Amino acid sequence: MNPPLPSEGEGLGVRVPADWCRCDGTGGLDERAVWSRRAVMAAGVSWLASRSALAQATFAQDKQDRNVVVVVFLRGGADGLHLVTPYFEDAYYRGRPALATRAPSDRRGGPRCVDLDGRFGLHPTLAPLLPAWADGELGIVHAVGSGDSTHSHFEAMATMERGLTNQSDLASGGWLARHLESQAGTSVPLRAVAWGYTMPESLSGAASATLVETLSDFRLRAPRGDVRERLAHLYQTGGDQLSEAGAQTLGVLQTLEKLDPKEYKPENGADYPKTPTGQAMKEVAFLVRQRVGLEVACLDSGGWDSHVNQAYLDQQMGDLAKTLAALRQDLGREMSRVTVVVQSEFGRRVEENSGLGTDHGAGGVFFAMGGGVAGGKVYGDWPGIGPDQRTGPGDLRITTDYRTVLAEILEKRLGSGAVPDVFPALDSKRLGLFRA
């Protein structure tokens, strides 16, 4: 008797981080039902995709020194003005009398930002990133975004992860998926991996992508031996897409068993935070060191929707900074072939609200870190944040199309010649943020 296939939904792990569903009405509570439907559909797709992705070769796999792009998505709309403060702007302090981070030279009480270039300062909880900045391996893009005008988390995330400027654009799948499929002939096991509960939309449509909560838990929850042999026989004789996916999955399981990620010990004294993002990044470092052909890694960081009591962002910022610093310390010279980009679906409004928080805005901030980054600089044309310089209901105006940053990553770090297919109609000049 053949072993049964999983029942519908079994093992999909559909869990919705609560902070993704809390808002003040600008793209919030009404989206709960929409997200629930999307989560189920995305999880169903990711269950199939994750089982069709990784076993396209044996364990004697691609050992080349392939460049790796790590995408960290700050879910909830991170406040770019809080992370990277324009402390030279009086309008910043007028708009945020309670929340503003003080200028580096301000000796009054309260947290002071750390000067970067005489105009912008890094929030003090992001201080672990300063060595990368000093070494020219951390760059920042300010006033960056997609132009999505809905102020909805889910619409804005979908727009950005699909590589679009609005939902009416005609482009299928996610931007990373289009890149991977444009070079499908180079596919190897563990080429694209996402950590989380659902496959990110950026990888939607990629046959060479898998989804894990942790590498250690990506395993067959059944005894070795007879059951596995029967599964292998079932999938080999099936001849359909599900059988092919199952056969590929068994190959992935064998690969991960040989790699044994649980035994990974970070090097150079690196200490990753004991958080989902920190531990996922530790596994990214493990795959980078194993040279298994990893090209794309996607991680999420939740809790950035700061409508009320924004001071709690210190925890999120600290986790992010310590995670990135640990990766850089752990990998050492290996960091020369790793590029990390940190993005969020939108920024926040210039002025604080009555709940000591900030509401959904437009322009935000991106970070880029790695040996291929032309860092030590804040990129982008600064639009100003005075009342007559803002857009919409009081937002930081976008001056850099986010696709410009991502396109340059593909060109310079992954050697892509298919950017017009990945980002149709993109004609923006490149920033010079990355080196080949």
Image (spheres, rainbow, N blue to C red):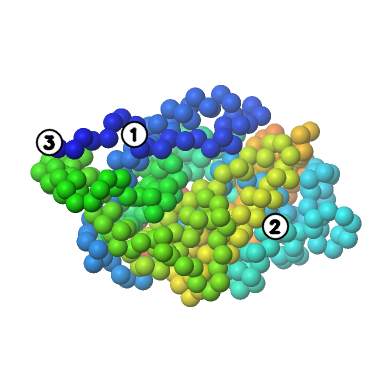
Quarter of the view holding residue 348? top right
Give the vertical position of 14 relative to 426 (above or below): above
Task: Work out whether mark 3 precedes mark 2 in sequence or the reverse, and give the earlier one.
Answer: 3
Q: Which mark is on residue 1?
A: 3
Question: What is the residue that sits farthest to the right in this orientation?
Answer: 108
Task: Work out whether mark 1 precedes mark 2 in sequence or the reverse, and give the earlier one.
Answer: 1
Left-right relation of 149 to 420? right
Return the residue at label 2: 125
Residue at (22, 45) in percent of width and height: 246
Identify which amino acid the numbered label 2 is placed on.
Answer: Thr
Q: Nearer the viewer, mark 1 or mark 2?
A: 1
Return the residue at label 1: 10
Q: Secondary structure at mark 3?
A: loop
* Quadrant of the drawing holding the C terminus: bottom left
Quarter of the view holding residue 302? top right
**Could you tell me residue 109's position as x and y percent?**
87, 55
Identify which amino acid the numbered label 1 is placed on.
Answer: Glu
Q: Secondary structure at mark 1?
A: loop
